[in-house]
Amino acid sequence: MAALILRPLPQAWSNFEAFPRNRLAKGTQNRRHSSRKRSASALVASASTTGATGMADGTNRNGRDGPSSTAEVGTIDDIKAALYQALTGIDRGIFGATSSKKSEIAGFVELLESRNPTPYPTDHLRDKVDGCWKLVYSTISILGSTRTKLGLRGFISLGDFFQIINVAKEEATNVIKFNLRGLQLLSGQLTIEASYRIASKTRVDIKLERSNITPDQLMKIFEKNLDLLLAIFNPQGWLEITYVDESMRIGRDDKGNIFVLERNDDIEV
C-alpha cells in the first residue's frame, strides 16, 4: 500500500393538533431522505454511463467528454455518498471487483479529483493530511494463487487498514490488521514504516524503512510467504495526492493504483 497512501419533531401543543403535525413532519423527512437517495442514484447512473468525468474544461482525466457543470454532477457530498454506495459489498476491492464496478468507482474518484478543494496538498500536510486514516478502497488486489498462499480464503481474514501520518517527523505508518480462525481467535497486524519527502506541490517520494508482524504466531504463519506479503503492501515509490479535504483523501501511486481513505482520528491503532 502506498504510504500516503501506498462517513424534533415539534411537540404538539394540543391533542387535536398532534396527529396532523406529526404526519406532516414525517412526510417531510421521507421526502428529504428520498431526495438524497435519488441524488446518489442519479450519480451512480451518471458514472456508470460516462465511466469517468468532469474536469473544469468539461473533459475527464483521460481527455474524454464528461459533465461540464456542477449542476450535472451534484455537490461534493452527493459524490461522496454515491461513492460509498458503490463501495458497498466489495470489501475495499482487495479481493477484486468486476470491470463495471471498477469503472463506476473510477468515475466518482475522478469527479472528486476534478473538485479537489486543496490543489496544492503538500503545502497543507500538517492541517489536511497529518493524523490517522482508514482505507475504504484500493485497486491493489489479492487474487488467485496469491490469496491461497497467504491463507486468505477462510483461515485468515483481513481486518481494517490504517495509515498514520506524522508530518513533524515526515513518517507514514501503515497498519494492516489480521484475524485468524482456529481453536482460538487470534488477532495480529503487519506494520510497515516509511519515510517521505515532498517532491512537488502534489507529490511525495516514499522510502520503505522497516516492517514487522505481530504476534509471533502470526509471523510464523506468514514466514514462508513474507516476501509475497510485503511485495503487495510495499509503499516505496511516489504518491500523488489527487484529492484531500477534512474527511477524505485520494491518492495515485507510481504503480497505477488508486487509494481512497477516510479520516479516522478517533480510533486507537
Image (cartoon, grey):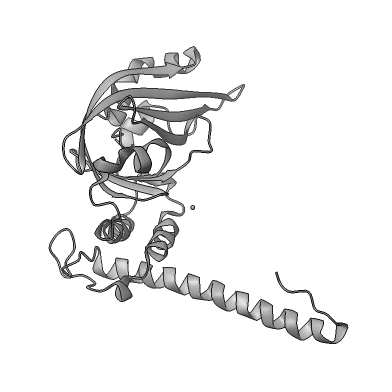
In the rendering, at what x and y percent does residue 44 appear?
37, 67
- Give the image quarter of residue 204: top left
Instruction: Tell me the residue at 31%/66% (across/down).
Output: 47
Asked if residue 94 can be seen in this view, the reply is no
Query: How many numbered badges does the structure rendering display?
Result: 0
In the rendering, at what x and y percent does residue 215 appear?
49, 16
In the rendering, at what x and y percent does residue 176 appear?
42, 30
Asked if residue 107 can be seen in this view, the reply is yes
Whether 81 is drawn above or below 180: the answer is below
Q: Is residue 119 left or right of residue 95?
A: left
Q: Is residue 142 left or right of residue 176?
A: left
Whether 90 is drawn above or below 108: the answer is above
In the rendering, at what x and y percent does residue 189 appear?
46, 24
Instruction: Tell me the residue at 16%/70% (across/down).
Output: 65
- Viewer-proximal residue among 228 and 205: 205
Instruction: Tell me the residue at 53%/38% (across/down).
Output: 266
Whether 173 is drawn above or below 203: the answer is above
Instruction: Tell me the residue at 72%/81% (across/down).
Output: 23
Looking at this rendering, what residue extends furthest in the right direction? 15
Looking at this rendering, what residue extends furthest in the left direction? 63
Q: Quadrant of the N terminus?
A: top left
- Viewer-proximal residue among 173 and 15: 15
